[in-house]
Every structure is written in structure tokens, then in C-alpha cells.
Image (cartoon, rainbow, N blue to C red):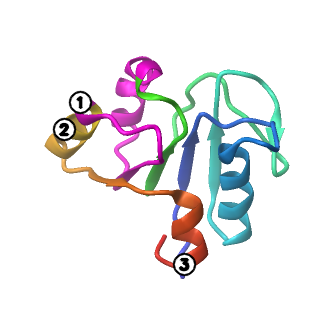
Amino acid sequence: MASKKTVVIGASDNPSRYAYQAVHRLKAHGHEVVPVGIRKGAVAGIDIATDKPTVEDVDTVTLYVGPQNQPAWYDYILDLKPKRIIFNPGTENDELERRAQQQGIRTEEACTLVMLSIGNY
């Protein structure tokens, strides 16, 4: 399987968070991971970026930020020009999905952890 560069929005260094688990599992599956969050820290040996870094050739953005906090991320996410955005449970957002689809970005309401576990990431 080819590596899919993935930006994890809402990354956390807290092991009880799904975003933490996603970074570990993505890395274990051979994907290049860029964790982005609001607090400094590290996950899976990768520093969490807190400055909305420029990332080239993004395949997937996977969201772990609730819809009420997403508007501050809209421009950043869309400017990454990912091939797809995964809206994990609890992050579903019709407005962001519509804006992404208007730019030709695929959207999926799915769970990154489940997708990885069943081999359809």
C-alpha cells in the first residue's frame, strides 16, 4: 500500500485521545503523518505543530476538532489542497464538507482508526 501523507488536525499527546491513537496507527501503517494541534507536545516521536505549517502533497486531512471549533481551521485545511478530508465521529460539518467538495476535495464521514483496521484507508 502506498504511503498517504496525512495531516491530523486536533493532534494531542494525551494517550486517551483518538487523535493520539490515529497518529500512532497511521505511522505503524507506513503513512507520513503531520500532527497539528493547539498545544505543544509530541506524539509517536513527532512534534505537534501549533503554527499551521505549510505541508505539500497532502493526501488526507483527518479531523479530530469538533465542528464548533472548525471555522478557525477552514482556510488552513482547504489551502492544504488535500485529496480527501475524513470527518471522524463527532466532527461532521456540512458547511466545511460543502466548501471542500466545491474545490474538488473528497469528503468522508468515517473513522480513521476503523478504516486502518479493516484496510480501506
How far across and how far down the image is residue 11, in percent?
Answer: 66, 37
Marks 1 and 3 sit apart, C-alpha to C-alpha, by 29 Å
Q: Position of residue 9 (x, y in %)?
A: 55, 37
Q: Up-down: is 90 above or below 45?
A: above
Q: Which residue is mark 2?
A: 98
Tell me whether the residue at label 2 lies in contact with that at label 1, contact meaning CB atoms closer than 8 angstroms: yes
**As drawn, 43 above or below 95:** below
Q: Amino acid at mark 3?
A: Ile
Q: Residue at x 82, y 38 (%)?
A: 42
Residue type at mark 2 is Arg
Whichever of labels 2 and 3 marks the residue nearer the N terminus, that label is 2
Q: Which residues are magenta?
A: 68-95
Q: Secondary structure at mark 3?
A: helix
* Residue that carries the numbered disc 1 in the rendered image: 95
Q: Give the mark nearest the N terminus, 1 or 3.
A: 1
- For label 3, the residue is 118
Would you say residue 57 is visible in this rendering?
no
